[in-house]
Image (spheres, coloured by chain):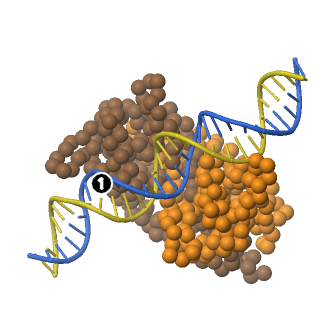
Chain colours: A brown, B orange, C yellow, D blue
Amino acid sequence: MRQDPAVAEPDDSPRLPATSYALLGLLTFGDELTGYELKQRADMTLRFYWTAPAMSQVYTEVARLLRLELVATTVEGRTTRYRITDAGQQALREWMDTTPAGFPVLKHPVALRLLMGHVTEVSQLQTMLEEYVAELAANRADLAEVRASLVGADAPGQPFYYPSLVADWGLDYFDGERDVARKTLGRLTEAADQ
Amino acid sequence: MRQDPAVAEPDDSPRLPATSYALLGLLTFGDELTGYELKQRADMTLRFYWTAPAMSQVYTEVARLLRLELVATTVEGRTTRYRITDAGQQALREWMDTTPAGFPVLKHPVALRLLMGHVTEVSQLQTMLEEYVAELAANRADLAEVRASLVGADAPGQPFYYPSLVADWGLDYFDGERDVARKTLGRLTEAADQ
DNA sequence: TCCGTTGTATTCCTAACAGGAATAGTAGTC
DNA sequence: GACTACTATTCCTGTTAGGAATACAACGGA
């Protein structure tokens, strides 16, 4: 996707795609990471609110960030570690402060298929919704585990305060989805029983 | 994105990306549409649960569907109308019945920026959340309008039954988001006031 | 009547993005 | 000492987003 055109601006702050800033943000927690570790951290945290970028994309992203000097590297044998630079901090801060809120983009395959439910049997839709509820539970459990790992450093002012806010948001979201999916399943069953 | 590889299968039913099936689904409501109208219908309905495909993509999609004979055309002057074929109906049905539920992909710029809230001021985050709540209200209103337009044909068995189920799902989702955003805003304010 | 605007309809281009395969070294284990 | 799992990176292909460009209606006003 192309949220922002990655075109050089007249001023010295080029607008990067949101994924660039997402990765840059993952580097603001105080450590140096390899591309591989960045991918892992993205899978751990980012994937619940953003798409976890593909490996290939992580590497092309950090290459660009390096070119723009928003990150710096420490090479050690055949592994390269990335850390955010002052310019990177500044660019991130500016992006945070000047970007309009922006509406979530959702790709919901279950809702999509429900929309054209008339092309198949009700029982098929019921199965789909049940599967979805099960997947939701699994994902909720994953996120709950992540959330639990933040406990102890999740108070205001502590390093994981904001991640904990977002994780709680995600847990509420999953619970909401579960409720709506169940409600819809109920409506389907009710209609089928008549 | 590449949900499904668009590779020809050994059997005669190639797996298409989900967006192809989404457009095919929009053609199952009984009418013939131009690419332009398909885009409009997608903006009207699809955009709440899926991304409304770009114009360019609508046209490349229908071109492929035509090549695969899943749609047929009626050319009239310089406008081309597309309708779903029997083969298209069958392909859609098969996709509906054989695809695993599939988990939603979410790109939530507000959550993303909240995750790295520590790089900016709390007031900035509060503003962002307030903007988001306002945008949610606007989107909810749009969807409510769409939902209202289905009334009268939204009972089980009627043409807009499934669209109405999905629209109700979406309304609940927006309400849930509004509640969580407000809750998070409250937590932020509480922490800032201490 | 001419002109500008709005809406319809389509095409083209570029860059972002997903997903996986390929490679290759390294560390533990049976 | 082979087998497996994990770390680390690169490459390729096709999908997707977003916008610009084109062009031809139709409509309303000066």
Q: Position of residue A123 (x, y in %)?
A: 66, 80
Q: Is residue B176 left or right of residue A158?
A: right
Q: Chain of mark 1?
A: A
Q: Position of residue A188 (x, y in %)?
A: 70, 74
For the C terminus of chain B, which image quadrant?
top left
Q: Quadrant of residue B186?
A: top right
Q: Quadrant of residue A173?
A: bottom right
Residue A190, visible in the rendered structure:
yes
**Residue sitting nearer the eye, B12 or A58:** B12
Q: Position of residue A73 (x, y in %)?
A: 24, 41
Residue at label 1? Answer: A36
Q: Is residue B71 left or right of residue B113?
A: right
Q: Residues within 10 Å of mark 1 (few under 14, many from 20)?
A: some
Q: Position of residue C27 (x, y in %)?
A: 15, 64
* Callout 1 amino acid: Tyr
* Above or below: residue A168 compared with residue A185: above
